[in-house]
Image (tube, grey):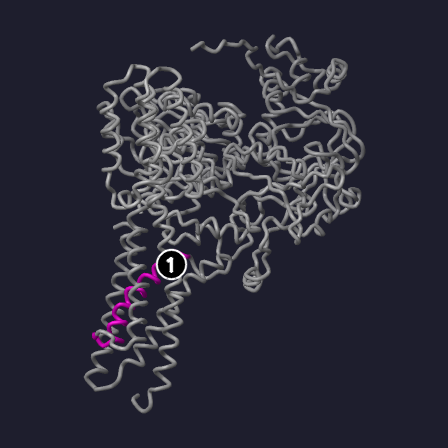
Amino acid sequence: MSALSLRRWGHAFAFVSLSSLSLYLYWRHAFSLGRTQFHSGWVLLAAVVFLAAYNLRKKFPFIPLGSSSAWLQVHLNIGWLTFILFAIHLEFRVPTGALEAVLAALYLAVAISGVLGLFFSRIFPRRLSQRGQSAVSQDGKDRRRHGEEILFERTPVYHRQLRERAEALVLESAKMSASLTIADFYRDRLHRFFARPRSFVMHIVGSGRPLHLLMAEFAVIRRYLSDADRAILDKLEQAVRAKDALDYSYALQSVLRTWLFVHVPMTYGLLVFAVFHGVLVHAFAGGSR
Amino acid sequence: MKAAASISIHRPQRWDEPFSDAMSDADVDWLLTKPPLSRIDSSKFPSATPLRGILENDTRIIRSQPGDIIVREGDYGHSAFLILGGKVRVIVGQLDEEILGRQQTRKKTLLQALRQAWANSHLSEVRDTARYGKASGTDQRGQGSEVRVFLQDAPAIFARRETVLLEEGTFFGEIAALGRTPRTATVIADGECALLEIRWQGLRDIRRWADEVKAYIDQLYRERSLKVHLKATPVFSHLSEEELSVIAQHTSFESFGSFDWHGSYMQLENLDPSERVSHEPAIAKEGDYPGGLIMIRAGFTRLTEQVDRGDQTVSYLGRGAAFGFSEIAHNWRFEEQLPLQQTLRAVGYVDVLRVPTFIIEKYVLPTIPENLLPPPIKVRTTARSAWKEAGRPGLDAGLLEFLVDNRIVNGTATMLIDLDRCTRCDDCVRACAAAHDNNPRFIRHGNRHGRYLVANACMHCVDPICMIGCPTGAIHRDSYGGQVVINDSTCIGCSTCANSCPYSNIQMVQIRDHSGAVILDQNTGFPIVKATKCDLCGDQLGGPACQRACPHDALVRMDMTDHQALLRWVTR
């Protein structure tokens, strides 16, 4: 068994153990007719505070607080555990009060965005390293062949380079021959394609349909061109493929970067509401404990 | 379209760029009157590289002032020195790091680490200029790469320290120059003196054609380093001093490949992969008789096996490794005549020692402990299939070829990123910036093979070319962890290291004061620049921030000489 598989099994075992312990404690208290919500609430709040602390750990990398990967593993385990704690805290019912409903919705938004983030983090890197690394540099080299990594921040530069290259090819065709086919094809179909990133959702779901449709249109006009224009069309096709790969990389990297902009702010919102909820609950608890 | 007209130029020649433009015929005439050069028989030199030509193009005359530091212990050199007039002193033992222009890396305390949270500037590359020019006991004269560092009170240091006096006609620095090993001592001018600095190419040719110089240098190496090297090699560790002396006398020194590999290896990138290997000289060939044990003294080698019609890389060996022992031991034990099973090729510049087989059979094998004997060799009876070999377990051939072709095997802390796990979050880049003046010391970009990316981060090379030629010794190996670091206080911004690094992993940056203003040279008005690179967070608690910041275990700093660690990481 590889080191990573062993670690995964270890964390799965820890999660099952902690979940079982939580459920056991809940049932024991429930059968003795005790109120568990104060305890489960405080444990849940502590867990969410700990989960939020991971972001602080990232802000201070020079302080020796353990590796980020170890934090992430614990973050994931505690995160999964909060599903159990949350259910216990709600006593397996749907919340009815307005504040409780908002709080529950915030929790679910944070938790679901976290699960989605985990999914993206596990699936998209592999897809990116298999495809999505092809773009054309200033010297016209195919970056995938030369094994270069596309930096997300430089995507607009690569986009511009590809558009300029495509426009230069179209102008070359117009100057060289009397044919307007390539120029018209570019104006009606490709100009829009090269103008900005395209097919965002289709790339996320891994569909190659937009590119296939475009390539079919290339095939339609190719048969009517001269040899010289066909050579230009071939280069244009290469540019389209490179742009599609760039869009693919852009779409996946965008999602990998932006899901945290949902997850982290919602976590802070959840913390504020949770503290408010705790104050209210204790203020109006009376002799119910 | 009209084809571009071709142009003709002279094929670049070795002496197109002489070591110094100042060497005149009169200088060469004068040099040829000075011993030991006057004793060399110039008729033995070939017409393409006459002795006069070597002296004119591969040497320069240096006039040192009292207290000038000529070489520093630990520096990597590409030249040797001959004393033409005056005296120099070799310092026995280590001088203070500060005197040598280096910094002592000290780990931050927990409080200092915490203090960074609020005390770090929000601007990039901010420096406290008050600390510049306060190196204790030394000063500088000259400009740029011609700058000379001198001891302000050399006589006091000579009085306090044990020194060895070297006088006119003596060579020094030749071992480090030929083997690209660190200088073993610091040498300081004792009064005004004239020195002939000979770059390695010239020294190599003089050694090749002047028997007395070769005998002199080889004897120096035998006396100073060889026995230590032999003793550190496991297969010789059980031998007595007398036996080691006999082996040392029979050991020959050989060099392969181009010393300037860092300037030429990138041109090989355009060749077909199968052709690249053929550009690397074979030190020993598969199928040949194992004529001796080959020990690698400096540089890197590639081990290849013939697969179908090509050569497949199966491993790489670096300094301290040995080749051919398995075959010699097998033949001795089983009285067979097995040839070498693999080819050893020089990747870049390689310096080897060769101990003849009969010496190994006579002195080493009869008394070697059983646990040091290699297992018997299983001889292949069928030709190898490239398809089957490509799928064998361990480090796959493609990855090995990639690591060797791109000279990544040179790194002891290479930044490898597993792109199948990397989410491109740039936490590593941000962590690096937070630990280094708000400016990351690497770029998450670089050579890529499949799912593995070798990022543009200093690899802390086994053969650190960047350390050759630093005029102030600012770039050096840290005495704490052995990593290559730059002392910001003594870096004069000459860019020698940045231009030398074959991997483009050293960046020159403009520095600022606390207000954010760019600091200018008061003489020229140009911005002051400093060389910056990864220092492996030597002063930070917990080790490299980049590796600790990666949430997905995608990034690792890998010692490429540790094959097992690499294999474990790749197959984790």
Quarter-wise, where is residue A33 in the image? bottom left
Q: Give me the residue at 33% from left, 90% from top.
A: A286
- For label 1, the residue is A70
Q: Give me the residue at 25% from left, 75% from top.
A: A95
Mark 1 nearby-residue class (10 Å; few <14, some 14–19, many ≥20): some
In which chain is the residue bearing label 1?
A
A125 sits to left or right of B556: left
Q: Secondary structure at mark 1?
A: helix
Q: Horizontal and vertical percent for residue B516?
A: 64, 51
Secondary structure mostly seen in the magenta stretch = helix
Quadrant of the frame with the N terminus of chain B: top left
Q: Give me the residue at 56% from left, 15% from top.
A: B12
Task: Give above or below for A134 relative to B272.
Answer: below
**Mark 1 belongs to which amino acid?**
Ala
Task: Give above or below for B298 relative to A107.
Answer: above
Start-end of magenta stretch: A68-93
Task: Give above or below for A256 relative to A281.
Answer: above
Q: Horizontal and vertical percent for residue B228?
A: 54, 37
